[in-house]
Image (cartoon, rainbow, N blue to C red):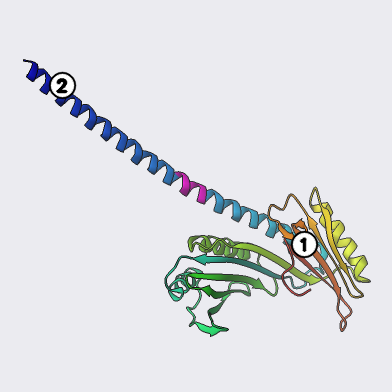
Amino acid sequence: MLKTMLNNGTKKGTLFILLFVCCTVALLVNFQSVKAKSIALDEVVSQASVTSELNGSLMSLIDLGKKTTVSDSPLHIVLKWQGAISGYNDPSVEVAKLCARLGLTVPSGIEEEGRMTYRSTAAKPYESRLSLFWSELEEGNSYVIVTLDTADLQNEASFQVIADEVSTMLEQSNIKAEWNVSLQGIAEKQGGPEEVFSQTEGLLKEQFETVSEKESYKDVATVSRTYSIPDLKRSIVSGIHSVSAQIAVHKEDQQGTNRITIGFPLITIEY
């Protein structure tokens, strides 16, 4: 009888252990599933935040550009994404994947200064152009620059849609890219560059609640200054300052007209 009780106890103990193990495994599987969903959700939220940040800045820049330049004159816009990619085996394969996503022709690699580089460009709607520059830094690591530009902004909505698509495609390609956008046009107000600059800076301060002046530069033909603007969520470190925007006014020698260039968070084209 004692033996029977022991056997029954052993069976119950084994059953309890099996039940405990099953429950534990189920909980772990459920935890991993929840964790994976949470990570995926965080990535979606992060991408949505970056897209929203870019959209807001781009619209603010275009609005400011229209206020400060000659009505119906060409608005030149250059939007750049720059970032690194790593952990791949063959750069040509990754370039081909990214080009397919961006609607670009797959380029052949060219060796420049001992590094493989890839370039491709395609026309987009409303006189826009999309370009890719890929440079291999070392085995399994590259630096990527994607540029969307137009010599004359003709359709804001179309430009915005393409910008959103590029941001998403870079994210899907595991390229954590930082964006920078610059706008350029002929100043509505003419005269000395300092006077034009002062008016443009005044409009910037009207557009945003808090604008703090940072670094400045001035010569005979050019005036430039950077700013910290909390409403513009993206900022970078320039010198010892964290800046969100830059304005430059340059008086051209031949035409004698003032050219305005505005960049968020910095100007990355010649002004």
Give the x, y percent position of residue 144: 56, 70
**Residue sitting at x 55%, y 54%:** 47
Amino acid, disc 2: Gly
Left or right: 154 with respect to 97?
Answer: right
Rendering coords of residue 194 (x, y %): 92, 67
Residue 32 at what x, y percent from top left?
38, 43
Mark linked to residue 239: 1
Q: Which residue: 43% across, 73% down?
A: 90
User: If you read the primary sequence from the N terminus, does the residue marked by circle 1 or circle 2 appear first?
Assistant: 2
**Which of the 4 image quarters holds residue 134?**
bottom right
Is residue 127 or residue 119 the one in the foreground?
A: 119
Q: CA distance from mark 1 to mark 2?
A: 75 Å
Q: Amino acid at mark 1?
A: Gly
96 up-or-down from 179: above or below: below
- Residue 189, quarter of the rendered image: bottom right
In the image, taking residue 95 as reference, residue 184 lies left or right, namely right
From the image, tell me which residue sits under label 2. Answer: 9
Residue drawn at point x = 82 percent, y = 64 percent? 68
Decide: is 245 above or below 147: above
Of residues 135 and 240, the one nearer the viewer is 240
Residue sitting at the far left: 1
Give the mark count.
2
